[in-house]
Image (cartoon, rainbow, N blue to C red):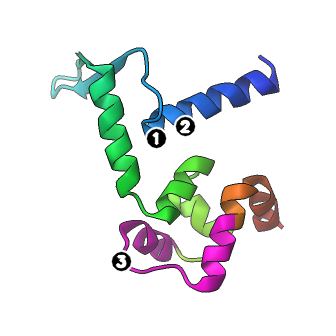
Amino acid sequence: MKKKEIEALEHEARAMDRGEITPGRVWKVTKRPDGTVEREALDPETHRLAQAREWKAKTEAAKIRREINVTQDAFARMLGVSLGTVRKWERGTIQPSGAARTLLKIAAKYPAIVREAAMK
């Protein structure tokens, strides 16, 4: 698979996650106590609407982290802040400072550069 094809699939998956487009199928998978798995089909449009509502409720920091597809721990290391700080930003308990907001905007627009800078 070519890089452009992979990027297109990633873009589509993020759009589904944000509730912008409806997936073809949606399954709720539940693991039972005996170790078996139960699979239930859900209505794709209902799922899309729920995803869109959930996405709107997220803080800017949570949206940016989700867009660049990293864990909270990795995001904290990328930005040079503590894991607790990232969690508080995402819960809305505290707001990022001016410098942190600028760094978040840069991370949203140029995640590869922020990742590279964090590695050095």
Q: Which mark is residue 28?
A: none
**Looking at the rendering, which quadrant does residue 41 occupy?**
top left
Asked whether residue 71 is in view, the answer is: no
The CA distance from mark 3 to mark 1 is 23 Å
Q: CA distance from mark 2 to mark 3?
A: 26 Å
- Main secondary structure found in the magenta portion: helix
Count up the numbered dots: 3
Q: CA distance from mark 2 to mark 1?
A: 6 Å
- Report the residue at 42% width, 66% height from top: 90
Considering only order in the chain, which callout, 3 or 2, is on the residue closer to the N terminus?
A: 2
Whether residue 84 sits left or right of residue 73 in the image: it is: left
Residue nearer the viewer, 23 or 74: 23
**Magenta highlight on residue 41:** no
Could you tell me residue 102's position as x and y percent?
Answer: 67, 75
> Residue 18's mark?
1
Image coords of residue 53 (percent x, y): 32, 46
Helix, strand or loop status at disc 1: helix
Q: Amino acid at mark 3?
A: Thr
Front: mark 3 or 1: 1
- The residue sitting at 34% across, 48% down in the picture is 54
Picture layout, residue 38 above or below residue 61:
above
Q: Amino acid at mark 2?
A: Arg
Identify the element where label 2 is drawn.
helix
The boundaries of the magenta stretch are 83-105
| Amino acid, disc 1 | Arg
Residue under label 2, please give it: 14
Query: Do the numbered discs 3 and 1 sit on residues whose CB atoms are within 8 Å?
Result: no
User: Would residue 40 be found to the left or right of residue 115 on screen?
Assistant: left
Residue 97 in the figure: left or right of residue 53 = right
Q: Mark 3 sits on what residue?
A: 93
